[in-house]
Amino acid sequence: MASSLWLGRLYHDIYIYVPKGRYLLGSMAFRGICKSPQITFRIDGTLVTPLDYRVLGISTEWFSFQGINGVSIVGGALDAKGTSLWACKHSHTNCPAGARTLSFTNSKNIRIRSLLSLSSQMFHIVINGCENVHVQGVKIMAAGNSPNTDGIHVQLSKNVNIIKCSIKTGEDCISIGPGTKNLWIEQVTCGRGHGISIGSLAKDLKEEGVQTVKIIFLGTQNWLRIKSWARPGTGFVQRVRFMDSLMISGVQVDDIVYQDIRGTSSTPVAIKFDCSPKNPIMVGEEEEKHEAKGHWGFRK
């Protein structure tokens, strides 16, 4: 059963401290609107879920923040013990959907620093409908075969920074959903999983101002992807920069830069532009030096 805390009547800064140790905790929901200017969670210990995955699995989130302005989460570990639920899903038996470990909805001025998220039942961190979010020094770990365990998912949000994080999971390292604006990703290591993806895009929503800088991919199935449904629509992807580190789209794709891309490919085609016949991609090269033994693949 979820516990709920309403923070609306508190007018001063709030400081919540978790000392060293392991603490069993069910799902928690923190709801605003808050009067306090700043809420800080300082975690030196490890928070764990009950052993029975069904206890948490019937919830949508383990920790959720809704309508909060000014919250910081610093340090500590969140161990959702998702292994048994993953096994249930792989066996195709009747399983609950599972819970996201940490979710922020319709909130502003969020800081997440030096947090460790382990074995989430579903997505580790969700940023939905938020503004001014800074994620730094976060470590995320889940098995390579863990289903629906995206590391960080961002959608309908603007002014989000993800910096100096290490993400090893079974799904997308970072997934970028519809309505994302001004997302900056820098010095992130993605190990295992599906890399960084934009999409799958909805019919009419937009992606704008997404930038990734100095990303390291270790054993991922994909690197950088832009995905969309193969159907008509008015949505668009624009002002996206992939720097120092595959684009698949059925909506208009404009002003995309791949800069200083290095590495090896396990397949003959290292880079493929899979273009829409209706909205073809214009590919240009500027001072490019190709040293790979494979070849570039283009399909229109």
Image (spheres, rainbow, N blue to C red):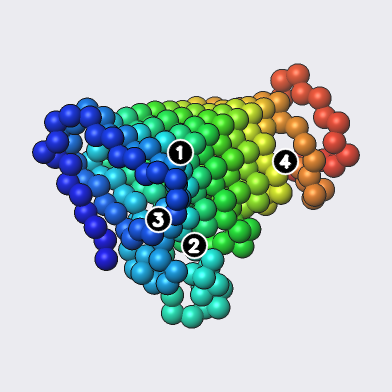
Badge 4 element: strand
Please name the residue that numbered disc 1 is placed on: 75
Foreground residue, 183 or 66? Answer: 66
Q: Where is residue 244 in the image (x, y as percent from the top left)?
A: 67, 27
Residue at horizontal 45 percent and vertical 50 percent from the top:
21
Q: Residues within 10 Å of mark 4 (few under 14, many from 20)?
A: some
Labels 4 and 3 touching (C-beta < 8 A): no
Residue at horizontal 32 percent and vertical 30 percent from the top:
109
Q: Which amino acid does the dot numbered 2 rest on?
A: Lys
What's the CA distance linking mark 3 and mark 2? 13 Å
Labels 4 and 1 touching (C-beta < 8 A): no
Q: Which amino acid does the dot numbered 1 rest on?
A: Gly
Camera-nearest label, 3 or 2: 3
32 on left or right of 141: left
Please name the residue that numbered disc 2 is placed on: 81
Q: Position of residue 65 (x, y in %)?
A: 29, 45
Q: Which residue lies furthest to the front in this view?
A: 20
Residue at horizontal 44 percent and vertical 45 percent from the top:
20
Badge 1 element: loop
Q: Residues within 10 Å of mark 1 (few under 14, many from 20)?
A: many
Please name the residue that numbered disc 4 is placed on: 271
What's the CA distance linking mark 1 and mark 3? 15 Å
Please name the residue that numbered disc 3 is placed on: 23
Q: Which of marks 2 and 1 is nearer the N terminus?
A: 1
